[in-house]
Image (cartoon, grey):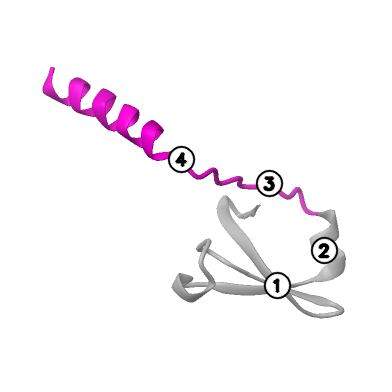
Amino acid sequence: YFFDNGNKMYIYRRIDKETVLCGDNPSISKAKKYKSISYDVFKRLEINHVVYRKLSDDRKRELRKIYNDRRDQ
C-alpha cells in the first residue's frame, strides 16, 4: 500500500503498460474508491508491504487465554 493524501491506497494490479489500479481496501471487491495512476508516478511512490502470518492453533489458544484473563480482571 501507499499513502495518498493521508489515506491508505492498496495496489491491485497493473491494467496495462502505463496504468496501475489502486483502491482504499485490501480487497478489490470491497473497495469504495478506486484510483488509476500512471506507472511512472507509481515507481516514485514509497510502497509499504503488509505481511500476513497464519497463526497456529496452539498460538491462537494462547492468545485467547491471555485475552480472556485480561478481560476478566
User: Residue 25's spot in the image, x, y percent?
Assistant: 50, 63
Inspect the image, locate mark 4, and give the three-letter code of the amino acid beneath it. Leu
Relative vertical location of residue 59 with respect to residue 14 in this rendering, above or below? above
Inspect the image, locate mark 2, and give the three-letter code of the amino acid beneath it. Val
The residue depicted at 87 percent of the width and 66 percent of the height is 40
Inspect the image, locate mark 1, and give the three-letter code of the amino acid beneath it. Arg
Residue at image mark 4? 55
Q: Of 57 and 45, which appears nearest the observer?
A: 57
Residue at image mark 2? 41
Q: Quadrant of the N terminus?
A: bottom right
Question: Which is in the foreground here, disc 2 or disc 1?
Answer: 1
Q: Tell me the element at label 3.
A: loop
Q: Of 30 and 39, which appears nearest the observer?
A: 30
Bounds of the magenta span? 45-73
Contact flag, marks 3 and 2 (Cβ < 8 Å): no
Relative side of 44 to 36, left or right:
right
Residue at image mark 1? 13
Tell me which label, 1 or 3, sits earlier in the chain.
1
Please check the rendered image and state whether residue 64 is part of the magenta-colored stretch, yes or no.
yes
- How far apart marks 4 and 1 lie (CA) works out to 28 Å
Tell me which label, 2 or 1, sits earlier in the chain.
1
Q: Tell me the element at label 1.
A: strand
Contact flag, marks 4 and 1 (Cβ < 8 Å): no
User: Residue 12's spot in the image, x, y percent?
Assistant: 65, 69
Tell me which label, 3 or 2, sits earlier in the chain.
2
